[in-house]
Amino acid sequence: MRLKRIAAAVIAAALAVNTTVFAGYYRRTGIKPFDGRSIVYEPFDVNRSDKTIAEIKAQIAQPGHEDELKALLSELYDELLDVQYSGVSAGLISNKNYTDENVENYTKAIGIGIDVIQKITNVLKEAYNAGYGSVLLEVLGADEDELKELINTIPSERYFELMHQQTELETRYGDIYGDSDACAELYIKLVNIRNDMAKEEGYADYADYAHTELFGRDYIDRIGRFSEAVATYLAPLMMALISTEMDIPDSYGSMTDDEIKKRVGSVMYSINDELGDSYDFMLDNGLYDIEIRDGKNRASGAYTTLLESKGVPYLFLNNELDDPWRIKTFIHESGHFSSLLNTPELDEPWALFKYSLVEDTCEIHSQALELLALDQYGRLFGEDAANERFSTLATIAESVIDGCFYNEWQTRVYKEKILTVDRANEIAAELMEKYYGVSDFRKSEAQRMWTSVPHNFVSPMYYLAYGVSAAAALDLYTISLTDRDAAVDMYMQLSADGGFLTFTEATENIDLDNIFDPKTIERISREIGIDCGYAYTDTKYDSWYAKPLLSTSHISDGRTEYLFAPEQPITRGEFVRLIGRMYDYYKGIDGEYTLTFEDVAPEGAEYIMWASANGIVDGYSDTEFGPDDAITREQISVILSRLYKYEGHSAEEAAVSSDFKDIADISSWAKDPLMWAAGKGLINGRDNDMLAPRDNTTRAEAVTLAARYIEMEY
């Protein structure tokens, strides 16, 4: 029980993750519907808590008032919940409609919250010292050690005074957001106040204090090795992902809110029904706001907060997102929502005092869900799925790097004896070279960068949570590449455990590898590199086929992990599996197909049987397919034309240049399909204006054909 962190959660509308009660993994009971559309700011009347506290003091002035004290403490906790709801509702209302009046209400609510928390904690200490420890143990549902920790961590009067000062400065950030110089000066003041808060609690600086008291980090002694491994192994992968992402055209259009909700819902159910049920609970009860409209607070970001008195979370997105990022952020926050909604501890008495949400753990719930959603990107983003896939992987990898970058930057900033804006910029510019390889980063650029990150101002030292959780999420993703069911099972266990476990406890509970071991970071980077097509030693990444190869890496494989064999012929089995995976990824294959070909191995056979059963490809006989035979260019044209017809189109002959010198060489049964494929731009001529219809198709040509088909059809 870290009371200072509990107070911060009550006061500052902490980011959260909640769970649901629907089956299997989730264990919480008694979730009650609450209409999120009815949220209004409810000012808290301090006279209520003052009266209850006065009555408690009267009862504990003499022994023998155990029953009276229990009843009063129950009232006091209800009042505490109302204080929390007042602060959270005021924060939501001000973010939904950023007006001077709403911001003033939020500032007032936070100030009242600080005062009420201070009074409540002091009267609990008085009750304990008056000999009513056994009553507190019973009412709080805590053990003796937890109760002693609670009493011993009650902050000083000076600490609460500094919290008021901190809150006043934090609320000003939204007004000056975008003014780099003003934000920088504000930040220096915040650093000084926070360092005073840390010293008040016996710490040398705020960085050490926050790691221990506010975030409960049980791994901080290992963060140095972790950061070095991230800079060494993961940073190059992130840069490659970003480079590839930028090279793939992005033509994604806009979506209505209803379409976004429908598509995200399908993603949730595709992963696990309980996630889908939690998601539906959110929609049915209006516990979200994803609408783009005028008046929202542009500095608020996206977050999920806990309405503790109502027993449910609330999900909020601001306007600063285009459609792909709205969808992805909605999925991210839905991971928070589902875990928080179902956290079983929330049903316990005085849960808000007994437990502290561990953001480092909570962020795995969100970022791992983003990665588990990658196999649904074809149906989410169509032809832009490859681009968005690389973008998401790059973003999660960058979260690890950003987490290390901002943690080291803030740690050094808070340890400066006399901090200036220039020194803060100098440290940031220095670390840009370490983590991003940027050696000429100017101080002015550094300032614009760090002043634009709200977490630096309103959630100091939080960013490391994104870093370690993203690394854990990437590790879970690598498991999903070979055993998706196992990865989903691990994720659901993690989500059901909620956000009250420390990072180490949560990851060890699901037997996840130790991400603080540099070998783990090296392995994660290598396996994701292989998955994205970066690891082939026989591939020229500046060649004509490099972009198609990378953009189809989610549906194609190399001959081995490190050999793609671009110039070798693709086999019948390889090509049909390629288009089968393609169709499954973008449209979805329904039904089960029985293997009848005796010469086809079970692995990947479902795609061959799907194609055969639907007339897309023929076997040599009912029992022979010839999966290892090379396939010609005209044969591939026939298969693609049949796939096109299967998708509901007419694959008629398209206009094609008569300059090809070998049109007469096309087999009669393949002429129309090949002319269609050439006319559609799927197949180009080879050297000397030759279609080469009976030549074998190379593996490089095959992935290029797939990439062109995706762009044409999806």
Image (cartoon, rainbow, N blue to C red):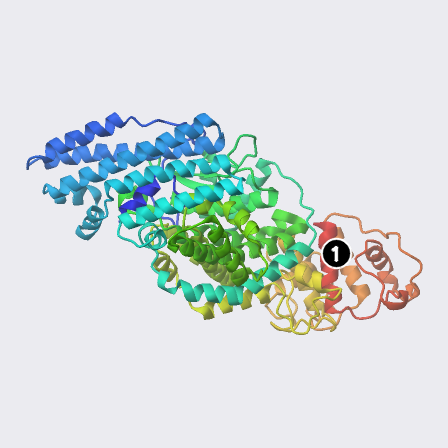
Residue 501 relative to residue 562: left or right: left
| Nearest to the observer: residue 234 or residue 442 | 442
Element marked by disc 1: helix
In x, y percent, where is residue 305? 41, 40
Q: Is residue 698 above or below residue 17?
A: below
Asked if residue 481 shows in the view, the reply is: no
Asked if residue 71 shows in the view, the reply is: yes
Q: Is residue 241 above or below residue 258?
A: below
Residue visible at 47% across and 55% down?
A: 403
In x, y percent, where is residue 581? 64, 59
The amino acid type, in three-letter code, at marker 1 is Arg
In x, y percent, where is residue 306? 38, 40
Residue 604 relative to residue 629: left or right: left
| Nearest to the observer: residue 378 or residue 352 | 352
Residue visible at 19% across and 32% down?
A: 53
Number of residues whose C-alpha sits closer than 10 Å to that of mark 1, classed few (under 14), some (14–19) or many (20 or more): some
Which residue, given by chain and number where applicable, does mark 1 sit on? 708
| Nearest to the observer: residue 364 or residue 395 | 395
